[in-house]
């Protein structure tokens, strides 16, 4: 899909909020701007995921794990660039999250359960009873609901990235995607 020539008036200024720090537009938001309904769905759901009760570190661990499991490299890069500092996620940790076979014993149990949640939803579109029991041990019902919305929203985002072939991170742009 190409960049939309014009947006409906109601969306015209909203796409300006979805840019990289260098001002380049985020490709997924540009693609969805072809349809006001699709754009509203993406922006509303994403905003809700990024502004809820979940601590930024826990949110980004969950999001990164979902995205790497689904192979959404450009979206992984975007979250590392925009949120790794606030989430205290290092380059080494980002690489560890990308390896489904990595030993995650160094993570506290309330973070390990988030990684299990991401893995299970990605793998089976379900959550086993054991993982659910661990989630409710560490998170109240309001946060469990938010965690489910985050994992499913970012699985949807990963699928959109894959379908639209937005995952190429090439050339000079590659540097802006690295953790600092």
Image (cartoon, helix red, strand yellow):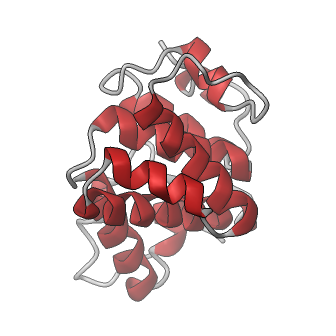
- From what the image shows, is residue 106 above or below residue 52? above
- Is 7 situated left or right of 140 in this image? right
**Residue 61 seen in the current view:** yes
Nearest the eye: 9 or 21: 21
Q: Residue at x 53, y 61 (%)?
A: 28
Q: Locate residue 155: give its quadrant.
A: bottom right
**Considering depth in this image, is 23 or 102 the residue closer to the camera?**
102
Q: To which quarter of the image does residue 68 belong?
A: top right
Picture coordinates of residue 21, whole percent (x, y): 36, 33
The residue depicted at 49 percent of the width and 80 percent of the height is 34
Question: How many discs mark residues in the rendered view?
Answer: 0
Whether residue 15 appears in this view of the structure is no
Residue 87's place in the image compared with 18, above or below, is above
**Residue drawn where x is 23% and y is 66% of the image:** 13
Q: Quadrant of residue 33?
A: bottom left
x and y percentages locating residue 96 in the rendered image: 66, 22
Instruction: Give the vertical position of 143 relative to 172 (above or below).
Output: below
What residue sits 37% from the left and 19% below the top? Answer: 88
Location of residue 1 in the rendering, given as x and y in whole percent from the top left corner = 66, 71
Viewer-side residue, 90 vs 160: 90
Q: Measured along the vertical axis of the image, is residue 105 above or below residue 31?
A: above
Residue 59: x and y in percent read: 38, 43
């Amino acid at each position: 899909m190409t960049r939309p020539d014009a947006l409906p008036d109601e969306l015209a200024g909203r796409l300006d909020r979805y840019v990289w720090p260098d001002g380049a537009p985020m490709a997924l938001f540009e693609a969805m701007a072809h349809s006001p309904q699709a754009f509203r769905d993406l922006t509303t759901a994403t905003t809700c995921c990024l502004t809820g009760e979940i601590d930024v570190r826990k949110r980004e661990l969950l999001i990164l794990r979902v995205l790497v499991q689904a192979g959404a490299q450009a979206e992984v890069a975007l979250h590392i660039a925009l949120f790794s500092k606030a989430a205290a996620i290092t380059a080494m940790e980002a690489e560890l999250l990308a390896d489904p076979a990595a030993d995650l014993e160094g993570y506290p149990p309330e973070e390990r359960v988030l990684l299990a949640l991401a893995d299970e939803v990605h793998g089976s579109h379900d959550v086993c009873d054991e993982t659910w029991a661990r989630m409710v041990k560490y998170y109240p019902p309001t946060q469990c609901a938010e965690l489910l919305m985050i994992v499913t929203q970012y699985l949807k985002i990963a699928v959109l990235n894959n379908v639209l072939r937005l995952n190429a991170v090439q050339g000079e742009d590659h540097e802006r995607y690295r953790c600092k």
